[in-house]
Amino acid sequence: MKNTLIAPSVLAADFANLQRDIEMVNNSEADWFHIDIMDGVFVPNISFGMPVLEAIARHAKKTIDVHLMIVDPDRYIKTFADLGANILTVHFEATTHLHRTLQAIKAEGMKAGVAINPHTNVSLLEDVINDIDLVCIMSVNPGFGGQSFIENTYKKVKQLKEIITKNGASTLIEIDGGVTSKNAVQLAEAGADVLVAGNFVFKAENPTQTITDLKKLLAS
Ligand code: DX5
Ligand code: ZN
């Protein structure tokens, strides 16, 4: 079976012990860091901003996958590149000229991602699929960690996988929200390449072991 990647979402970390939690991910079998930036406008919550990302990036030894839940993300593309983001994901619903935004992200040397809300149909991405490195399918409404997984996501993953294959694209499919050991295998089977996990990892009694178990489950 293919290697499904795990991206722990730092939103669920203990911010009073951020360095400890970053090191936990560094020393685990996790593949990426998933970083949620919320502006209180695009989503009804504010997470953290540039100084915190700068601190995370100083310690992180794995790919930094930044998920922008902000309006007008074009304003900050260069800033996030300078802060060390490797993948920059903007919301489909927050961009007016998505094709232009994708090129601007790549021009800064980052991989370009597009996130879609639960109500957004994957077919809307077809005309730019060859320009997208990663599609993040939101399996909860963005804004908060710890929400329940929306079951309609499986269907969306399959539909998106078909679009990617049909167009000969190499776009990765990432799932974000409510991921646990209960839905991980079914998501991977539907075509998911990257699973974001916040609460399931960081609120576990043993986060390192939880990541190991999840990777094992996905490899079996
Ligand atoms: C939600 C964020 C997610 C969140 C996932 O708006 O984009 O990345 O941190 O957290 P869990 O896995 O707890 O749902
Ligand atoms: Zn996210």
Image: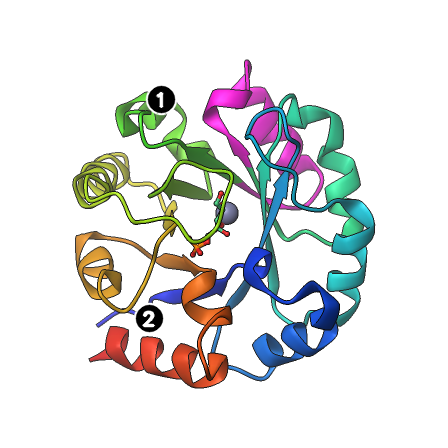
Between circles 2 and 1, the one closer to the viewer is: 2
Return the disc, 2 or 1, that comes first in the chain's sequence: 2
SS assignment at label 2: loop
Residue 22, percent across and down? 66, 72
Residue that mark 2 sits on: 3
Q: Residue at x 51, y 70 (%)?
A: 202
Left or right: residue 102 versus residue 119 is: right
Quadrant placement of the C terminus:
bottom left
Q: Who is closer to the viewer here, 194 or 13?
A: 13
Q: Amino acid at mark 2?
A: Asn
What is the span of residues highlighted in magenta in the rendered image? 90-112
Figure check: 24 above or below 168: below
Q: Amino acid at mark 1?
A: Asp
Query: What whole-number distance in Å separates the C-alpha atoms at marks 2 and 1?
Result: 28 Å
Residue 88, picture quadrant = top right
Figure check: 184 above or below 49: below
Residue 86, percent across and down? 63, 53
The verdict on residue 98 being magenta is: yes
Q: Residue at x 42, y 77 (%)?
A: 211
The verdict on residue 176 being magenta is: no
Residue 113: which disc?
Answer: none
Residue that mark 1 sits on: 127
Residue 139, percent across and down? 33, 43
Q: Residue at x 28, y 39 (%)?
A: 164
Residue 47, percent across and down? 65, 45
